[in-house]
Amino acid sequence: MARPTVQLLTDDLVEAVVEQARRSPRRRMNHNFHAGNEDNPHRFLNVFLEGSYVQPHRHRSKPKAESFIVLRGHMAAFVFDDNGAVVSGHILGPEGFSGKAPAGVTSTVAAHGIDLAPGLWHTVAALTPVAVCYEVKPGPWEASTDKEMAPWAPAEGSPEAAEYLRNLLQP
């Protein structure tokens, strides 16, 4: 499939992806701007609904940096050590956050986004009912090497995942 020469990130596109996320059991959805798996870098709109759990992971096997820029709502980004302890936590969003910050948030700097070096254990989570971000990371995507899931965190979809996320986000 040929990639359009120009792709606009519009409110209509965002709302369409939000609706897809609402219908998804994972409570999140992405819209790719890259043409295919081999395209580099991968660029996509990523919509997270409150309660969507992303198992902490890192991109080390084929080292990949990853960037998130939050366009709507607020997200928390956490970096962990090898044992699962939070090393740093950051609130990301286009404007000031008025809610209660999770206990693991270590940065009081207002940040629109975050750029993570390859190999860092990390996760992101919505702090508002809807959080929309623009994400960039190197391609290609290969399921077997893209992510190393943290052995100390529950798997996505497991009965323990919701409680782990609640504990991570508690003020």
Image: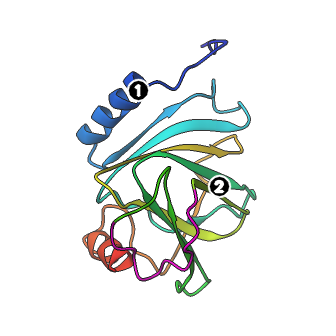
Instruction: Tell me the number on the disc at residue 74.
Output: none
Question: Residue 161 vs residue 109: left or right?
Answer: left
Q: Which residues are magenta?
A: 99-111
Residue 110 in magenta stretch:
yes
Among the two numbered marks 1 and 2 on one chain, the one whose residue lies closer to the N terminus? 1
The amino acid at mark 2 is: Thr
Colour mapping: rainbow
Closer mark to the observer between disc 1 and disc 2: 1
Q: Tell me if mark 2 has few (under 14), some (14-19) or many (20+) residues whose alpha carbon lies within 10 angstroms of its own.
A: few
**Picture quarter with the N terminus:** top right
- At 59% from the left edge and 59% from the top edge, which residue is drawn? 147
Q: Could you tell me how far apart the alpha carbons at marks 1 and 2 are, in whole angstroms?
A: 34 Å
Question: Residue 43 vs residue 100: left or right?
Answer: right
Q: Tell me if mark 1 has few (under 14), some (14-19) or many (20+) residues whose alpha carbon lies within 10 angstroms of its own.
A: few
Q: Quadrant of residue 59?
A: bottom right
Q: Position of residue 32 (x, y in %)?
A: 54, 31
Q: Position of residue 149 (x, y in %)?
A: 53, 67
Residue 158 in magenta stretch:
no
Question: Residue 83 vs residue 47: left or right?
Answer: right
Instruction: Tell me the number on the disc at residue 145.
Output: 2
- At 74% from the left edge and 56% from the top edge, which residue is drawn? 62
Name the foreground residue: 146 vs 138: 138
The amino acid at mark 1 is: Asp
Q: Position of residue 109 (x, y in %)?
A: 58, 69
Q: Mark 1–mark 2 contact, CB under 8 Å?
A: no
Give the prevailing secondary structure in the magenta stretch: loop
Q: Position of residue 44 (x, y in %)?
A: 56, 36
Residue placed under numbered mark 1 in the picture: 11
Question: Residue 159 vs residue 139: left or right?
Answer: left
- At 66% from the left edge and 54% from the top edge, which residue is drawn? 66
Task: Say which element carries label 1.
Answer: helix
